[in-house]
Amino acid sequence: MIEDFIDALRNFARSKTRTILSLLGVIIGVASVIVITGMGSSSTRQIEDTFGSAGLDIVSVSAGGFMRRNRDAISVKFNESFRQEVFDNIEHIKKVWYKNSISFTVSYGDTSVTSSATAIEPFYLEMYGLSLDYGEYFTVTDQYSGSQKMIIGSEVASTLFPNGDAVGKTVLVTAEKVPFAFKIIGVLKEQTSGWENSTTGIYIPRGFYIKKINPEPVADTIMIQAEESSFCTPMIDELTEYMNQRTGTEGAVRIQSMQTMIDQMSSITNIMSLMLSGIAAISLLVGGIGIMNIMIVTVTERRQEIGIRKALGAPPLAICRQFLVESGGITLVGGTLGVVLGLGISFALQYIKSQPFAINVRSCIFAFVFSVCVGIIFGLSPAIKASRLDPVDALS
């Protein structure tokens, strides 16, 4: 077979134009599959980077769903009794966090920032993976005493304190048209963390919200932390069924999970990549048909060579193997060049876009193996035809 392969390379060199034309379909097909699957993998990775790794074990439940509620539906109040109710009826819950949102205008000197502040419970930021650039987190004491303390995002800090050193400063906060003095105790690092914004976020103890803003401890949103991120999807199904039964209507609450959102978008991206890869693979089949056509012409041109070899005692298997190696050799070379071209285009895209381009190694291997198989399959018929030639007819 090695001798047949070397002989096939010599035949390729003698018919350069024909060989190049035969290789083009294979090269383009293999390169297209590699680039398209790489773009799909890059999109999936970009989605994950956009949302970040924090919060993937969190299921968000907020009042007011997408469906219109029935008149007889029971309204849901996220009070303390509801927290225990969720624990008792839903499996794989690690902790339930309550939070509220309120419009804040934060002023320091002549500079002010208007944004939505989030009233949170102790250790919520730590659980969510939001790290501090400097300062400290809220404590349990801050929650129960309703401390007028604040943790702000990096963008808010740079706006109010362009010279830095935000921690320890006292700012004037206007909430519900009532002024309050707040002490800044921490500034968040700029990072990606799902629903929470580490750049424009403003966080205060929920104890202050309950004591000074709304004495009725009802949360706007509850964040249910699962024991593992893999439990989020079944937990959403359980919560949806439970809330439908409890309220007597569908869509009374909005239930979301960052993990399921990422999974859905990744699934769509993978389906699109698979479809485009299938279209690209068609060029491999077209290339295979071209190789089959070239091999039929080659067999016709080399009838005398086949007749001489048969007359000298070459068995049909040797003749068949010779042409199979030749057709497989074309796609072997084409597949190799296609992989090189596909990787080259991928690295070029990575350089142009200035961001990592994920290369799917399995798709590289699959495209290469598929191209070689195409050459062998489409070269089988001409090879069998060559092996069945009668020596007398071939030499005549």
Image (spheres, helix red, strand yellow):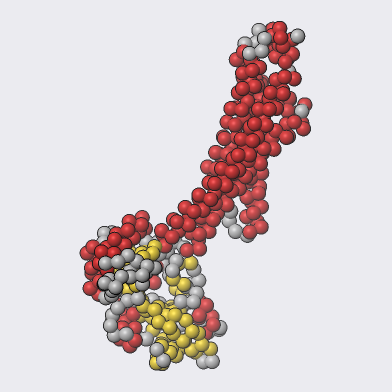
Which sits in the foreground, 334 or 125?
Answer: 334
Q: Give the total of numbered labels.
A: 0
40 relative to 319, above or below: below
Q: Quadrant of residue 281?
A: top right
In the image, what residue occupies the spot 75% across and 31% down?
18
In the image, what residue occupies the spot 34% across and 83% down?
209
Q: Quadrant of residue 284?
A: top right
274 relative to 194, above or below: above
Direction front: furthest residue: 71
Residue 203 can be seen in this image? yes
Q: Quadrant of the N terminus?
A: top right
Residue 208 can be seen in this image? no
91 relative to 84, above or below: above
388 relative to 47, above or below: above
In the image, what residue occupies the spot 36% across and 57% down?
233
Left or right, 181 with reference to 246: right
Q: Where does the image place residue 342, in percent across and percent down from the top left? A: 63, 45
Left or right, 241 with reference to 168: left
Q: Quadrant of the C terminus?
A: top right
Q: Where does the image place residue 50, in percent across and percent down from the top left? A: 50, 63
Left or right, 123 with reference to 173: left
Q: Where does the image place residue 254, in percent across and percent down from the top left? A: 36, 67
Q: Quadrant of residue 212?
A: bottom left
In the image, what residue occupies the spot 63% across and 50% down?
346
Q: Where does the image place residue 77, in percent across and percent down from the top left? A: 28, 75
